[in-house]
Image (cartoon, rainbow, N blue to C red):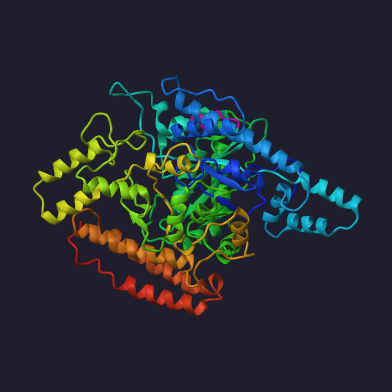
């Protein structure tokens, strides 16, 4: 429901039914400046304060603002840089939105674009009715009314919770509050934003315990908190566990953002074969139960803290991961009752929204299914979707060919390995890889296992630098810096640069940007990825790169079979137009799963 009183609940006031998730560190670093004025919510990574400082300087120049640098040796520089950048983004979005609000209703104006981008609904209908009005005085009154409904999309931020390495000073760990994630939380909490922080990548008890230090996460005088909390999760159990942990600290989780474990971009946090459809079905069936459970915990926490009783906003559930058509978008909204759908990788081809340099736009256009790879590139040891034709990958392989693998690790955000040094190293760093390769060369293990382990070592990429390069190259702040592209497998089905209007039309079913007619349904694509992942994990166990139990693989296969049966029962609702093809694909996948042999490996029992 629309309203124009400016008091709509935080996170529950979207005019659009999609949002743009965080992508890398640089691809969406300034996306709110580009699209928030059109009512579109997007997410900034606040992991790289060095990048944010450079982007802040850039936009201060563009908008003729004074730039006062925050040096790397200044007190609390990381948090202060994050705060300064977020405050600048907020100011620019507010100015751009007000300028849009005051623009004339005429062809190609900003305010016309705002309403043309909207999905069908009450507000869009009011806009169309205004256009059709022939009486000048009535039309002006209708236009004034429409202006009052304009509001910007949120400027949300993201941190990877577990990416919380301590800051080392003279070889010794410093104050825990200066850790990567904790200082980022502080930077966001001390900013002027009225938005949400997306916590991803799992549980960090130290970080959770730190958040209650900031009053912006709590209601004041019965009002909503200035800062909301979104938890990115891969299944219901994780949502319930983490939600209880936070509410017991007095922190309300306003939204659970459910992401496919494999059919996504960037880091892939695979479940044990649990599929997105059944997971969303569980959220739908248990949402009221979960909300009541968390409300009870919050009441107890507030009483213990001496805070007045508060009625938190309703619990939201959103979803993302591999969605690629208006039909799939509507399926998530209607069948699973999600509040918003995240569209990630396709927006890499929308220069109005994201930062990809010209060279890599061409590479993305040319990319096929073989070019988007679930790789071992991440120094975190988590599977990572990577464009294998990127300049980052070319530089990495060139270094290997020259006999000098590894990067120079100029930022060190992912330096978390203590194997060779009391000060942690990044596993993508030259210093680490030299020592690890020497260790393996001296190890008394089979040639096959040694080769596989060596390949795993040199696969690591300097993501801190290379994921920021797209923004720096695009904005002209550096010259041809190697760039990594963390697109998901969905990218293979798009093959042209699009405008923001074209992408919105695609999302809402007014046009199509797909480059092929045989793109698999998002649920089938995820299922195929999980089957491949299970087979890959079995191969890693066989080669000695991974230890796991037979029980886990049996459960993995059981979950896949259960998911296939769920899709079979819901097929008419999921893809009625291609029902027969959907069922045929399920039959083929079911046979593949049945033929996966988990009994002939020497695994732990």
Q: Which residues are magenta?
A: 186-192
Q: Is residue 364 left or right of residue 414?
A: right
Looking at the image, residue 571 lies above or below residue 450: below
Query: Is residue 594 in view?
Result: yes
Q: Residue at x 46, y 39 (%)?
A: 472
Which residue occupies 45% across, 42% down?
A: 473
Tell me residue 11's x, y (percent). 62, 45
Camera-side residue of 247 and 141: 141
Number of marks present in the image shown: 0
Quick one: 533 or 253, which is closer to the camera? Answer: 533
In the rendered image, residue 88, in percent from the top left (x then y), is placed at 59, 32
In the displayed structure, would residue 396 be above or below residue 283?
A: above
Is-magenta flag for residue 191? yes
Q: Residue at x 64, y 31 (%)?
A: 220
Quarter of the figure that contains the C terminus: bottom left
| Residue 377, horizontal then vertical, whole percent | 32, 49
Which quadrant would residue 509 be assigned to in this image?
Answer: bottom right
Was residue 103 drawn as part of the magenta stretch in this picture? no
Would you say residue 7 is visible in this rendering? no
Q: Position of residue 282 (x, y in %)?
A: 50, 59
Give the residue drawn at x 19%, y 67%: 600
Q: Please tell me which residue lies in front, 318 or 263.
A: 263
């Amino acid at each position: 429901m629309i309203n124009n009183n400016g008091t709509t609940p935080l996170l529950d006031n979207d005019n659009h039914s999609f949002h743009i998730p965080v992508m890398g560190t640089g691809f969406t670093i300034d996306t709110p400046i580009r699209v928030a004025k059109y009512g579109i919510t997007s997410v900034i990574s606040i992991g790289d304060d060095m990048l944010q400082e450079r982007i802040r300087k850039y936009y201060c120049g563009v908008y003729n603002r004074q730039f006062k640098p925050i040096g790397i040796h200044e007190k609390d520089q990381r948090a202060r840089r994050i705060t300064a950048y977020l405050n600048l983004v907020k100011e620019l979005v507010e100015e751009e939105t007000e300028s849009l609000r005051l623009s004339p209703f005429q062809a190609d104006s900003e305010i016309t674009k705002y309403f043309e981008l909207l999905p069908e609904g009450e507000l869009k209908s009011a806009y169309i009715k205004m256009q059709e009005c022939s009486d000048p005085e009535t039309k002006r009154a209708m236009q004034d009314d429409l202006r009052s409904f304009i509001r910007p999309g949120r400027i949300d931020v993201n941190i990877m919770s577990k990416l919380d390495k301590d800051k080392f000073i003279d070889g010794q760990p410093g104050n825990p509050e200066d850790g990567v994630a904790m200082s980022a939380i502080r930077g966001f909490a001390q900013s002027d934003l009225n938005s949400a922080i997306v916590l991803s990548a799992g549980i960090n008890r130290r970080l959770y315990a730190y958040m209650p230090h900031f009053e912006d996460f709590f209601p004041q005088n019965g009002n909503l908190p200035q800062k909301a909390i979104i938890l990115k999760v891969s299944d219901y159990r994780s949502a319930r566990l983490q939600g209880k942990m936070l509410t017991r600290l007095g922190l309300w989780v306003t939204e659970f953002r459910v992401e496919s474990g494999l059919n996504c971009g960037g880091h892939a946090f695979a479940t044990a074969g649990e599929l997105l459809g059944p997971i969303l079905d569980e959220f739908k069936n248990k949402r009221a139960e979960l909300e009541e459970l968390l409300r009870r915990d919050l009441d107890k926490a507030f009483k213990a803290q001496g805070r007045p009783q508060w009625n938190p906003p309703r619990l939201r559930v959103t979803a993302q991961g591999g969605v690629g058509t208006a039909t799939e978008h509507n399926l998530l909204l209607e069948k699973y009752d999600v509040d918003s759908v995240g569209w990630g990788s396709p927006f890499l081809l929308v220069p109005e929204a994201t930062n990809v340099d010209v060279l890599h736009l061409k590479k993305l256009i040319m990319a096929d299914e073989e070019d988007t790879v679930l790789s071992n590139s991440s120094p975190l040891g988590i599977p990572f979707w990577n464009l294998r034709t990127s300049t980052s990958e070319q530089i990495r392989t060139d270094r290997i060919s020259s006999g000098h693998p590894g990067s120079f690790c100029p930022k060190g955000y992912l330096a978390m390995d203590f194997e060779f040094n009391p000060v942690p190293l990044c596993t993508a760093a030259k210093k680490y890889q030299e020592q690890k390769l020497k260790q393996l060369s001296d190890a008394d293990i089979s040639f096959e296992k040694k080769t596989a382990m060596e390949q795993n070592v040199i696969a690591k990429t300097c993501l801190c630098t290379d994921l920021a390069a797209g923004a720096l190259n695009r904005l002209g702040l550096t010259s041809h810096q190697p760039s990594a592209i963390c697109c998901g497998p969905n990218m293979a089905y798009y093959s042209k640069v699009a405008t923001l209007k074209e992408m919105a039309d695609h999302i809402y079913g007014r046009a199509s940007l797909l480059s092929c007619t045989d793109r698999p349904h998002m649920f089938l694509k995820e299922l195929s990825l999980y089957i491949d992942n299970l087979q890959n994990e079995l191969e890693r166990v066989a080669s000695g790169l991974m230890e796991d139990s037979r029980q886990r693989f049996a459960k993995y296969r059981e979950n896949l079979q259960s998911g296939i049966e769920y899709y079979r029962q819901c097929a008419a609702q999921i893809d009625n137009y291609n029902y027969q093809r959907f069922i045929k694909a399920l039959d083929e996948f079911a046979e593949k799963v049945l033929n996966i042999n988990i009994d002939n490996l020497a695994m732990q029992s």
